[in-house]
Amino acid sequence: MYRFPKNYVSVVGGIGGTASYFAGYKLQAVEFGFNTSITLAILFVEWCLVMLLILRVYGNEKLEEKLETEPD
């Protein structure tokens, strides 16, 4: 995941997260309080931000591992 550009990973994660909510909506497991397209747009933005946050945390872990293995 980290070897791909962050923007692409974020967009793919946004699409996947939004699609899961849309599937729940179609299966009548989720109800949206607003218009469907507005809600899906908001969910897309939220999932993109969540994916960027995950990549940032994952990147920090990789950096910590690298710093721990370097000789002083």
Image (spheres, rainbow, N blue to C red):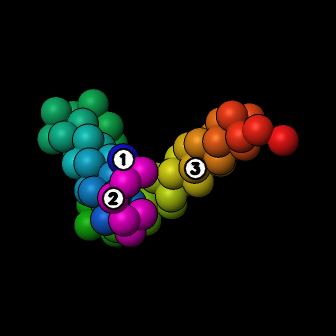
* Label 1 – label 3 distance at C-alpha: 10 Å
Q: Residue furthest right?
A: 72
**Residue underneath mark 2:** 4
- Residue ID at (42%, 63%): 6
Mark 3 residue type: Gly
- Residue ID at (33%, 58%): 4
As for residue 67 lying within the magenta part, the answer is no
- Residue ID at (50%, 58%): 52
Q: Is residue 58 left or right of residue 64?
A: left
Q: Is residue 29 left or right of residue 61?
A: left
Q: Quadrant of residue 62?
A: top right
- Residue ID at (76%, 38%): 71
Mark 1 residue type: Met
Up-down relation of residue 16 to residue 71 (above or below): below
Nearest to N terminus: mark 3 or mark 2: 2
Per the rendering, the mark at residue 59 is: 3
**Residue underneath mark 1:** 1
- Part of the protein shown in magenta: 2-7
| Tag 1 near tag 3, CB within 8 Å | no
- Tell me the SS state at disc 1: loop
* Label 3 – label 2 distance at C-alpha: 12 Å
Q: Is residue 37 left or right of residue 55?
A: left
